[in-house]
Amino acid sequence: MLHPIEVSVDEQLELSSKFKKNLNIALIIGVLLFAVGVFFAMFGGHGHEVSESGGHESHAPSFMMRIWAVLWQNAIFFTGVSAMGLFFVCVQYVAWAGWSSVLKRIPEAMGSFIPYGGGIVVLIFLGNYFLGHHDLLFHWLHHGITEVGSENYDKIIAGKSAYLNLPFYLGRMIAFFALWYFIWTKIRAYSLQEDLTGGETFYHKSGYLSAVFIIIFAVSTPMAAWDWVMSIDPHWFSTMFGWYVFASWWVSGLATICLICVFLKENGYLKAMNMNHFHDLGKFMFAFSIFWTYIWFSQFLLIFYANLPEETVYFIERIYGYDGKYKLLLFFNLFMNFAFPFLVLMTRDAKRQLSILKIVSIAIILGHWFDFYMMVMPGTTKGTSDLGLIELGTAIVFVTAFIMIVTKSLTKAKLIPANHPFLKEAIQHNI
């Protein structure tokens, strides 16, 4: 028989001046690393190469492509992770889940990055297009590529022009971000109103809106994957790719939720959370790491078995292309995103150890960052760029910005939704 457990639910996150200072320092370091990386890429021998005639041939397009590509990769990765915070909240509402109410504020706060990340994605796309580099990221934007008789005419891309065209593409992008952000603001507002008034009214409103969002998300997420990632290689296609990108975003989002909860718990917050809640988060990461691997292997197996050139080119490019430049990363990707979390989180005790959950969460986030790197870079830079200061600096800037925005959102509401209808059940959670 369970006995009542008394814990404080009146918790408010306060960010110390040291924490804020460290974030600012990290942001400056990221910007400096990026700037130094750009400098060396331009003047350190990687921005030019000797031509056959003996002169120096500029590789500005390749260099600029690397900049646009790494910005694009980080923007879509972190925006997707933030959207998965909202998706997690909505899934809990639709499932009438009680256990997660004690940690609901964390994924709820992650959604606050959606307008910033979405804005950055739109700006990168428009900047890439209007600053004279419109076809560096997306070959289908190349001038005259869909015009019969043009020297750049491409029959395959022309056949997809009803879907891959600038107005429709940009319209979809803005619509997705607008819908995600609108629903997040409503869910957030209902959550805060529930804190003030109690009752079940706002809980039910959140549940209805969550059901609508899941339907919207089920349509917009695979389309976003097609648009933002798969269209980088417009001749290649996979019917499973939308679910593959979703799986990568989703398990990254779960790892982010778990990591934030661990850090808050270690700093004396989330007293209502016990090891049973962390156990459930560990099970989520364990299960969906396997799910991601299932999607990865299914896509690979179907493409390998069919052996169609228009499909196999994706894996050939990443395994054998560019003198095997990405081959090691491909296997590292499988290790970090499947083997490591699978083996480490296999036991019950491992899912109840904060130190282990922290390590695995960081590994999963890092692994899926590389997963998106593998999706974006081979199709854009074509093996002309390396992992260096540009990539490291950009990642640090995005991580720092993400932490700044999410923690600021966390400070604006109680960490525990005191009037959530299922809060008592969550505090008693035991598995």
Image (tube, rainbow, N blue to C red):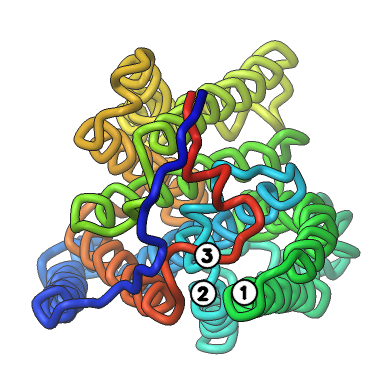
Dot 3 falls on a residue whose secondary structure is loop
Mark 2 and mark 3: span between their CA atoms?
17 Å
Q: Quadrant of residue 246?
A: top right
Residue 22, position as x, y percentages in the image: 12, 74
Q: Is residue 132 above or below residue 430?
A: below
* Amino acid bearing label 1: Arg
Identify the residue shown where x is 25% and y is 29%.
353
Q: Quadrant of residue 299?
A: top right
Most foreground residue, 279 or 63: 279
Most foreground residue, 423 or 295: 423
- Badge 2 density bin: few <14, some 14–19, many ≥20, Cα 10 Å: many
Q: Is residue 240 above or below residue 210?
A: above
- Badge 3 density bin: few <14, some 14–19, many ≥20, Cα 10 Å: many
Q: Which residue is disc 3 drawn over?
A: 417
* Amino acid bearing label 3: Pro
Identify the residue shown where x is 57% and y is 54%.
84
In the displayed structure image, the side of residue 317 where residue 193 appears, left or right:
right
Q: Which residue is disc 1 drawn over?
A: 188
Most foreground residue, 269 or 71: 269
Identify the residue shown where x is 17% and y is 62%.
389
Q: Which residue is disc 2 drawn over?
A: 112
Q: Are marks 2 and 1 in contact (CB under 8 Å)?
A: yes
In the displayed structure image, the side of residue 64 where residue 300 appears, left or right:
right
